[in-house]
Amino acid sequence: MKQTARIISTYTSDASGVASALFELGGMTVIHDASGCNSTYNTHDEPRWYDTDSLVFVSAMTEMDAIMGDDEKVIGDIADAAQQLQPRFVAVCGTPIPMLVGTDFTAVAAAVEARTGIPAMGLATNGMHTYISGAGMALAAVARRFADRSAVCTNRRSVNLLGLTPLDFSVNGSDAAMRRLLTRAGWEIVSCWAMGSGLDELCRAGQAAVNLVVSSAGLPAARELQTLFGTPYVCAAPFGTAFPQTVLQTLEEAADTGVCSVPYTARPTAGAQTVLIGESVTSGSLAAAITAETGLPVRVLCPTEAQPALLAPGDCMAEDEDDLIPLLAGAQRIIADPMYRPICPAGSAFFPLPSEAFSGRIYRRSIPNLVGTPLV
């Protein structure tokens, strides 16, 4: 039965993706749902919850609220909380029940902003998509709403990091490693979307000469910034020891020519006996890094939302376990979160690579920092 996970886990939902993307920006995120959704987010999807303050709430929607369509209650509750707490902005996102009753999140946000004077964004998540959809929606909304239109690029070697969230990189130092790699190569980092940068830094994103999209959650924001400022983007994560040089060279070319690029898609996949399961940009980049260091072709199976341009020829979208199982048949080596092991063929060698977005906190201490790290 399609879209049913009988054996493996599921990826973090779009609503949690919104909360994760906005966590460090000083806003207030409201997940419109019955009570319980927030505990799932903070215990399984958010490794920063116990170390960093952030305003993430659930609306505690009741059965009667859903039946009667009482939007006034949620608008009033959000407005009251915002007036007391004075966040930089308010973001309201949804789950399956609001989707079923047709909640208009744009209208809810407009009503909250009219009452409080605080910028508010409505994000029509519905719990039926992965974190990639929600985080991408949230970061694009931030770019659209808060990017300073008067910003001007004055340094050709300046860059924004987009799609940098712990759901793809955890809290193991990967974000700091990316900053060091770029800084040592002579790049000025304008902002990181959205780990390690506040809203004020994100507002200055138009000053960058190029955007580095390190996960597909950053692509909608990259396209928004390209529309606003003409900024080109490169989609790649600088994993391994050889592939970062390709990433840096591609950044230079994009800054010089204004042409966007996805360098990891140039890798070979024909005859690949090594399969990597995961999000498109991080997995594609890791596959390219493995090929650069070992010569082995690697094929990526992507179980999250992905634009076709983010997949190399031979890579494949596979969102359901019934799609994944036949694609794994015959693979000699499989690299994936440990919770994929039960659907892998018995004769294959399995290399665990935990993902915060898939297995949550279970294997968090085993998630490696792959930025600038030898892979063999």
Image (spheres, helix red, strand yellow):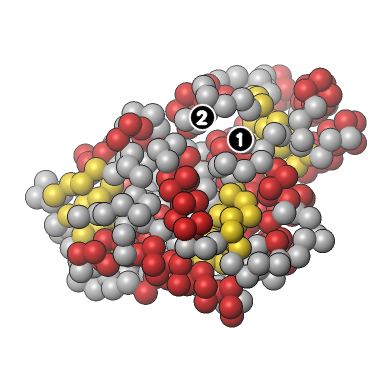
Q: Are marks 1 and 2 in contact (CB under 8 Å)?
A: yes
Q: Which residue is mark 1?
A: 23
Residue 39: tell me if it is visible.
Answer: yes
- Residue reaching furthest left? 347
Residue underneath mark 2: 48
Secondary structure of the residue carrying tag 1 is loop
Identity of the residue drawn at 14% across and 57% down: 332
Q: How many marks?
A: 2
Position of the N terminus by quadrant: top left
Residue 279, how many percent across, how many down? 41, 52
Q: Look at 62% across and 51% down and name the residue there.
A: 191
Q: Could you tell whether 355 is left or right of 270 in the image?
A: right
Residue 339 coordinates in the image, percent (x, y): 28, 37
Residue 316 - label: none
Q: Secondary structure at mark 2?
A: loop
**The quadrant where residue 23 appears:** top right
Relative to 257, does residue 312 appear above or below in the rendering?
above
Which comes before the other along the chain, label 1 or label 2? Answer: 1
Above or below — where is 39 with respect to 125?
A: above
* Mark 1 nearby-residue class (10 Å; few <14, some 14–19, many ≥20): many
Q: Amino acid at mark 2?
A: Arg
Residue at 43 percent across and 48 percent down: it is 177
Tell me residue 284's x, y (percent).
Answer: 37, 61
**In this orientation, does residue 76 appear?**
no
**Amino acid beneath label 1:** Phe
In the foreground, 100 or 323: 323
Q: Residues within 10 Å of mark 2 (few under 14, many from 20)?
A: some
Distance from label 1 to label 2 (Cα)? 9 Å
Q: Where's residue 103, x and y in %?
A: 73, 37
Instruction: Give the side of residue 338 with respect to residue 197, left or right.
Output: left
Residue located 68% across and 24% down the image? 59
